[in-house]
Amino acid sequence: MEPRQREITLRFLAEPQDVNFGGKVHGGAVMKWIDLAAYACAAGWSGRYCVTAYAGGIRFVAPIHVGNLVEVGAKVIYTGRSSMHIALEVNACDPKSMNRRLTTHCIVIMVAVDESGQPINVPEWVPETEADKKQHASAVKLMEMRKQIGEEMQIYVE
């Protein structure tokens, strides 16, 4: 059996159609790239079709300009029964200089589903390095925080 793919990097060139009214790449375009990378990462780990269950903690740190080379790195940091927590980092640079800078980061939770759209088990990811263990622990802590936030958000859906 081939080893599971835990990490992936997608690369894009920021194009004119990605620009917002302020002349920078639209946050929605960045979020689409994040979702694509999260899917590719989750599918690579699980070997299954996956759907987005949650995207949160997104931070837009710096703008992306038209013509920038954009790299979206994604890696599994926690697995549940059918879910995978994917940490994502977006970096951009002028392709002529290759001076990369962090522009965005977030967490996305993907769920593997079967042919009828029902959740299906995924292989467990076990952290090995100290950095992996810290990210895994952070994912567990964030799950608890999301539960509390979800309870608070109920006021808006009733």
Image (cartoon, rainbow, N blue to C red):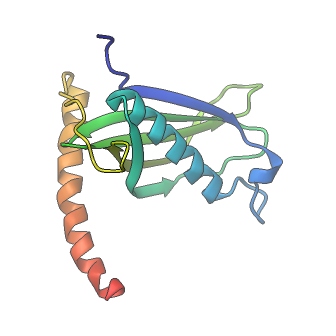
Does residue 32 appear to the left or right of 21 in the view shown? left
Q: Nearest the camera: 78 or 25?
A: 78
Which corner quadrant of the image does residue 54 belong to?
bottom left
Q: Position of residue 68 (x, y in %)?
A: 73, 38
Residue 107 in sight in this render: no
Does residue 66 appear to the left or right of 134 in the view shown? right
Does residue 158 appear to the left or right of 58 in the view shown? left
- Rendered position, 96 above or below 73: above
Q: Nearest the camera: 139 or 24?
A: 139
- Rendered position, 55 above or below 149: above
Tally of marks: 0
Which corner quadrant of the image does residue 50 belong to?
top left
Residue in view at x 20 percent, y 65 percent: 147
Q: Which quarter of the figure is the N terminus placed in?
A: top left
Q: Position of residue 42 (x, y in %)?
A: 38, 36
Residue ranking furthest to the front: 116
Residue 115 in sight in this render: yes
Q: Which quarter of the figure is the C terminus placed in?
A: bottom left
Residue ranking furthest to the top: 1
Residue in view at x 70 percent, y 53 percent: 25
